[in-house]
Amino acid sequence: MKTTLYALSFMLFCSMCACNMINPQEGIPTYIQIDSVKLLPTLSATHGSVSHKITDVWVYYNRQLMGAYELPARVPVLAEGKGQLQVIGGIWDNGLSGTRAKYPFFTVDTFTFDAQPTSVIQHTPLFNYRTTDTPSIKYYIEGFEQGNSFTKKNADTTFIKTNNPADVFEEDWASKVELNDSINSFESITTQEYLIPPNRECYMELNYKSDIPFMVRIEILYQGTYITSDVIGLNSKDNWTKIYINLKGFATTYQNAKFKIILKGSLPEDKHTSKTLIDNFKIVYFN
């Protein structure tokens, strides 16, 4: 009988140990509350506008990835004593919420804190455009303050500069194209050619506002032949918005090619007039 009791006691002890091994006591997290972020200027003449659409933060604790969080975010951190967070700004790749990505051209925000289990610590990450990296980063910027990098390709009309305050996103100038029943299509192409290295991150940035959808296309001069391809269609927007368009795939497929960007649109049958506005056009890539 004693043997049986000893055996049962031993089995019970082992099962309790096993439970503790499988479900160890959980710690109590400190919460980091991130409601918003800021993008600050580094060298404005190099990187242009600091308008942004940072939708997410990718959070690391002591350089270990914790996860990606949509803003505003409350991040639980199991920590003891002093710890450090690294925060990377995240975007919607090609404007799609299902393709969230770390934006490679922003600096990393670093935040040191003292763990306070159950407490909520407020933090606002600060980012900059990167300008001193190796390999270097190339910025082609067009804010329309000095000139206009778009010219007519085909169709009826093209983008022209405007300083009408109602049409300008920021500063003094933007670019617009208006359509009507007589002038019902536009196609504009950049005057600048871009030689983008293969297998390196490359994005086009654009602020825009439009009451019709329009298309972003790319013209590729590859081995003496011109190739034109659709990149992405942009929906109409009543308010100014920002988009980040990933061009890495084109530069990798067509290595050592030269690229130009095309913006193309037409008046829908159910409309008699339209206006499309753009500002802060950029091509950014690792050189």
Image (spheres, helix red, strand yellow):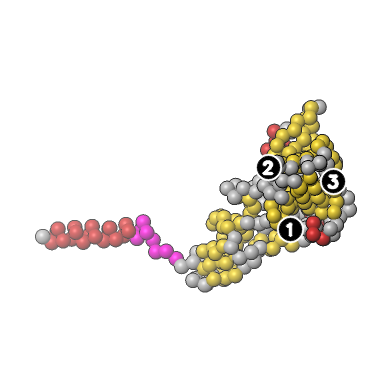
Mark 2 is surrounded, within 10 Å at the Cα level, by few (under 14), some (14 to 19) or many (20 or more) other residues, namely some
What is the quadrant of residue 179 in the picture?
A: top right
x and y percentages locating residue 202 in the rendered image: 72, 44
Measure how far apart labels 1 and 2 are at the Cα level.
21 Å
Q: Is residue 23 magenta?
A: yes
Mark 3 in CB contact with mark 1 (< 8 angstroms):
no
Q: Residue at x 60, y 47 (%)?
A: 99
Q: Earlier in the sequence, mark 1 or mark 2?
A: 1
Q: Quadrant of the C terminus?
A: top right
Amino acid on which the number 2 mark rests in the picture: Gly
Measure how far apart labels 3 and 1 are at the Cα level.
19 Å
Q: Residue at x 54, y 63 (%)?
A: 75
- Give whichever of 73, 42 is nearer the camera: 73
In the image, farthest residue toward the right: 146
Q: Which residue is mark 3?
A: 149
Mark 1 in CB contact with mark 2 (< 8 angstroms):
no
Residue 97: in sight, yes or no?
yes
Q: Is residue 24 magenta?
A: yes
x and y percentages locating residue 65 in the rendered image: 56, 55
**Which stretch is magenta?**
20-27
Mark in front: 1 vs 2: 2
Q: Residue at x 68, y 41 (%)?
A: 232
Q: Secondary structure at mark 1?
A: loop
x and y percentages locating residue 6 in the rendered image: 18, 60
Query: For residue 233, which numbered disc appears in the image?
Result: 2
Q: Earlier in the sequence, mark 3 or mark 2?
A: 3
Q: Which residue is mark 1?
A: 51
In the image, farthest residue toward the left: 1
